[in-house]
Image (cartoon, helix red, strand yellow):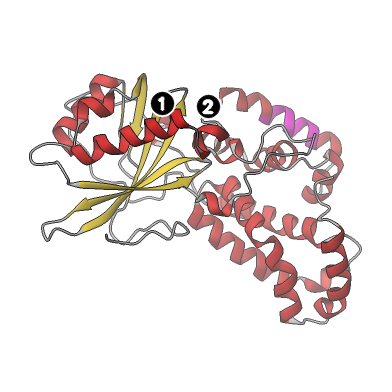
């Protein structure tokens, strides 16, 4: 029963509900703050964009405040807020292009193809910091995906291909573990329609290749720590051969908002040797460890002509066993920074 928030929450809600219905903004904030983070992550799964999720969360809270008269306290506050958030996401999906990763939109580029300029449209999936995600193992038997897997880039990229209501149904049923009847009530439809949408969504999700970056890979372990240490050393030394040796044969690198990507060790080595590590590249880069989308990640700082290391990208890695399967290198373009990661703009 996913929508139940627990005894403590119910006691607090019953205490504050009269003030909430009376329009007490402090009661509203106290009651909604406890759900703010999980609602943000729900919107992120729906939209694939951290910035869009923040905007829709604010819209959700505004709609909730304006709609207090419709909340009579006959149901718990959490599912009521999820209903508003899900509908706000569906409205956003209807008016925005779906997000993707470059490797889902074009064929891989050949070695020697010059780098294009960044796309100006907001097309790409964005990373989310692990600090905002409850990565504890799921205990709900209704859930098919745990919290970590359901925010990996591979999962999100496939999820974004689903129509909005199928996307919502799969998240509510297979990620959050809600019952079909609870989802039907939220979406104002029948249980049969929910089951049908879920069947179609699960069929489409068969295209999803599970990210094998495990909790152990993301959180520690000596082999993984050694792999990531070698990865950092290769960047700091501008060692393309050493870096490529850490990759799977079919590894890929994407660089949103650049629309191209490379796959395979030869093409990736060409890219590093001729584009990033060419010339006097040693000590040009500094990597700072962080975590995003349930995976190891690094903020990449590049030295400018004044000798200052400035934030240039946020890398999210996919690990498979003792190798790196993917590098998703989210570039900082113009004033665009990655909110939520608390990364300094310069070192």
Seen at 16% across and 37% down, the residue is 277
Look at the numbered discs 1 and 2 and tell me whether their residues touch, using CB distance below 8 Å. Answer: yes
Visible residue check, residue 158? no
Q: Position of residue 156 (x, y in %)?
A: 54, 38
Q: Where is residue 219 in the image (x, y as percent from the top left)?
A: 52, 39
Visible residue check, residue 77? yes
Along the line of sight, the residue nearer the viewer: 336 or 130: 130
Q: In this view, does 167 lie to the left or right of 183?
A: left
Which residue of the protein is positioned furthest toward the front in this rendering? 222
Q: Is residue 206 in the magenta section? A: no
Which residue of the protein is positioned furthest toward the top in this rendering? 249
Q: Where is residue 115 in the image (x, y as percent from the top left)?
A: 21, 37
Which residue of the protein is positioned furthest toward the right in this rendering? 74
Seen at 12% across and 61% down, the residue is 306
Real-space Cα distance between discs 1 and 2?
9 Å
Along the line of sight, the residue nearer the viewer: 332 or 221: 221
User: Vertical placement of 33 versus 168: above or below?
Assistant: below
Region in magenta: 194-201
Q: Quadrant of the N terminus?
A: top right
Q: Position of residue 202 (x, y in %)?
A: 68, 27
Which residue of the protein is positioned furthest toward the left in this rendering? 279
Instruction: Read off the residue under disc 2.
Output: 212
CA neighbours of label 2 inside 10 A, class few (<14), some (14 to 19), many (20+): some
Q: What element carries label 1?
A: strand
Q: Is residue 196 in the magenta section? A: yes
Seen at 81% across and 51% down, the residue is 3
Magenta span dominant secondary structure: helix
User: Vertical placement of 244 versus 56: above or below?
Assistant: above
CA neighbours of label 1 inside 10 A, class few (<14), some (14 to 19), many (20+): many
Instruction: Read off the residue under disc 1.
Output: 325
């Amino acid at each position: 029963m996913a929508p139940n928030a627990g005894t403590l929450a119910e006691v607090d809600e019953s205490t504050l509900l009269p003030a909430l219905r009376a329009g007490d903004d402090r009661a509203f904030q106290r009651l909604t703050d406890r759900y703010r983070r999980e609602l943000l992550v729900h919107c992120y799964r729906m939209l694939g964009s951290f910035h869009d999720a923040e905007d829709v969360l604010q819209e959700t809270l505004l709609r909730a405040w304006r709609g207090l008269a419709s909340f009579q306290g006959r149901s718990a506050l959490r599912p009521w807020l999820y209903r508003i958030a899900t509908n706000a996401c569906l409205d956003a999906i209807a008016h925005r292009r779906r997000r993707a990763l470059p490797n889902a939109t074009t064929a891989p580029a050949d070695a020697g193809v010059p780098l294009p300029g960044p796309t100006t449209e907001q097309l790409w999936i964005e990373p989310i910091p692990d600090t905002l995600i409850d990565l504890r193992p799921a205990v709900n038997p209704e859930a098919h995906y745990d919290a970590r897997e359901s925010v990996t880039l591979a999962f999100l990229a496939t999820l974004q291909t689903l129509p909005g209501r199928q996307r919502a149904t799969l998240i509510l049923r297979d990620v959050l573990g809600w019952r079909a009847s609870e989802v039907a009530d939220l979406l104002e439809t029948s249980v049969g329609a929910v089951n049908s949408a879920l069947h179609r969504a699960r069929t489409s999700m068969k295209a999803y290749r599970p990210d094998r970056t495990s909790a152990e890979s993301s959180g520690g372990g000596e082999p993984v720590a050694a792999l990531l240490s070698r990865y950092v050393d290769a960047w700091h030394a501008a060692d393309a051969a050493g870096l490529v040796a850490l990759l799977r044969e079919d590894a890929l690198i994407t660089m949103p908002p650049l629309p191209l990507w490379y796959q395979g060790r030869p093409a990736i080595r060409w890219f590093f040797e001729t584009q990033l590590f060419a010339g006097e590249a040693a000590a040009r880069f500094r990597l700072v460890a962080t975590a995003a989308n349930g995976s190891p990640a690094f903020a990449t700082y590049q030295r400018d002509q004044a000798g200052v290391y400035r934030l240039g990208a946020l890398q999210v890695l996919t690990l498979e066993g003792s190798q790196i399967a993917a590098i998703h290198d989210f570039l900082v373009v113009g004033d665009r920074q990655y909110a939520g990661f608390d990364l300094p703009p310069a070192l």
